[in-house]
Image (cartoon, rainbow, N blue to C red):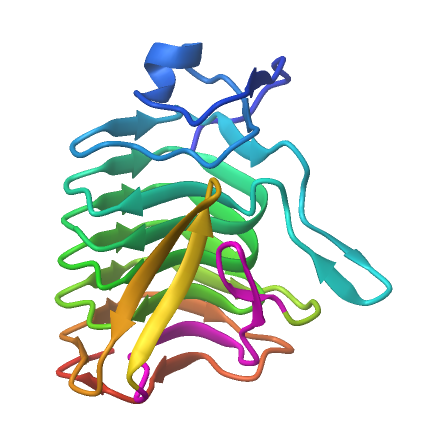
Amino acid sequence: LKTRQNRAPVALTAVVQGSIGNIAGAQSDIVLANTWVPGSHEVINCKGGTIRPAVPASVADDVAVPSVPDTLIYLEDVTGVKIRNCVLEGSTFGIFAVGGGHHRIRDNSIDAASTAVAFLASHYNSLTNNSLSATVSSVSVTNGSTGNLVLGNELVFKPGPDQRFAPGVPILAGYQYQLITGSNPIGGVVNIIVNGELKQVPATVDNFAENTRVLQNTVHNDGGTNGIGFAVRSRGSKA
């Protein structure tokens, strides 16, 4: 990443569409009032700039207080989004992908209170050469996600109180993994709320997270409970 310089932040008061370059120019700092929801094949190249929420995540009386918005970038049923050279900070969730896939996320620094990058039922994504830090999971690959590559990243545990499991839903994760892959062994749905809209991701008993490749990553887990976990209903994965 290029060295950051002091720049006036750009306040965005609606869900953002289009690339950062088109909105704010190269190396601009962007403050999101709502979660950014890109379309398929969009390119987000911050060129070293920062994306952060209007209200950062915090802790009050040892209880986690989510950021506003709680998620910076949400990829729902889209394909081929590229996110690179960005600093994502201050949020509860950094990048949350549900459905779709073939995304390329590389050369970013993502610091999140709960989860830095999550793939739910999202396939054939690559997560390469990023610096990721979080309390619950630096990387989460769950709910039938297939063929994802996690390569050459730095994963750092960040101490803190229990955090949300998914965007918009006040259910605590109750675990800590630097990288976790698996699927819910109990049939049902995972509820996600982004920008006031509910998304339900099915979790079936035959739903496996498959063929996740975890290669050449550096894990800093001082004070954490787990490093890399291939959990329930995960198969064909390797690290």
From the top left corner, tell me how far across and down residue 82 is, in percent.
24, 36
In the depicted structure, whether residue 53 falls above or below residue 48: below
Among all residues in the image, which is located at the extreme right?
A: 61
In the depicted structure, whether residue 75 falls above or below residue 63: above
From the top left corner, tell me how far across and down residue 45 is, in percent.
33, 26
- Is 224 situated left or right of 150 in this image? right
- Is 228 situated left or right of 18 in this image? right
The quarter of the picture where residue 217 lies is: bottom left
In the depicted structure, whether residue 48 falls above or below residue 145: above
Residue at 45%, 79% (x, y): give it: 227
Residue at 43%, 27% (x, y): give it: 15
What is the quadrant of the N terminus in the image? top left
From the top left corner, tell me how far across and down residue 16 is, in percent.
40, 24
Residue at 59%, 19% (x, y): give it: 5
The quarter of the picture where residue 85 lies is: top left
Query: Camera-side residue: 173 or 211?
Result: 173
- The boundaries of the magenta stretch are 163-186
Residue at 62%, 64% (x, y): give it: 158
- Is 100 situated left or right of 194 in this image? left
Residue 184 seen: yes
From the top left corner, tell me how far across and down residue 59 is, in percent.
77, 57
What is the quadrant of the C terminus in the image? bottom left
Residue 181 seen: no
In the depicted structure, whether residue 162 falls above or below residue 103: below
User: Residue 127: within the magenta?
Assistant: no
- Is 124 situated left or right of 92 in this image? left
- The count of marks equals 0
User: Residue 176: within the magenta?
Assistant: yes
